[in-house]
Image: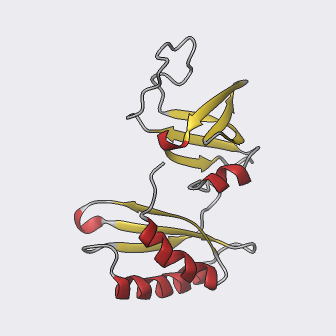
Amino acid sequence: MIKTPSRLHQLIEPVVTTMGYELVGIEQGGQGHRRVLRLFIDSPTGVTLGDCSRVSHQVGGVLEVEDPIPGAYILEVSSPGIERPLFEVRDFERFAGRKVQVKLSPAMVPEDKDPSTNPLVGRRKVVGVLRGVQDGNIVVEEQGHGLVLPLERIEKANLIPEV
């Protein structure tokens, strides 16, 4: 799973939690002048545009002083939304029983390369019901099969809204 540098997380999380929000996760993306630092925040009562603005102002001040990211970037603060991204092991434990979509890193090749015995061969996306965390892996049930996905192979994971 793509992890946020711990220094960045250590700077941002106390600011967000002190303000009464949960820091769901941090994404970094883009290149050159279009780099983006995206924070996802949540609270038991939900997140408004005003909440995002207040957090952006406070976190922006800390980042301005500490300067942990070289060069220019855009700071975005948003709610996780109905397709909530899953970043940490605790997220996979918390949302067990919910439908998820997991994008796998192509860099990892399973030891068993036979598609008849290993349903992950040649796949980058898994959609199914999250069954939880087991021995440092997540388990997703897809079409009646329990698929064991190593955390280090997960590039991105999101909840799928159930209507």
Toward which corner of the image does residue 50 lie, by quadrant? bottom right
Rendered view: 51 above or below 146: below
- What's the residue at 66%, 56% (across, down)? 90
Q: Residue at x 49, y 81 (%)?
A: 56
Q: How is the image coloured?
A: secondary structure
Q: Is residue 132 left or right of residue 29?
A: right
| x and y, in percent, of residue 116 in the image | 56, 11
**In x, y percent, where is residue 47?**
65, 74
| Residue at (62, 32) in percent of width and height | 148
The image position of residue 9, as x and y in percent, is 48, 70
Q: Is residue 16 left or right of residue 26?
A: right
Q: Residue furthest front?
A: 135
The part of the image, by quadrant, that contains residue 34 is bottom left
Q: Is residue 82 left or right of residue 28?
A: right
Which x, y percent locates residue 119? 56, 21
Q: Is residue 50 left or right of residue 31?
A: right
Q: Nearer the viewer, residue 56 or 92?
A: 92
Of 5 and 30, nearer the camera is 5
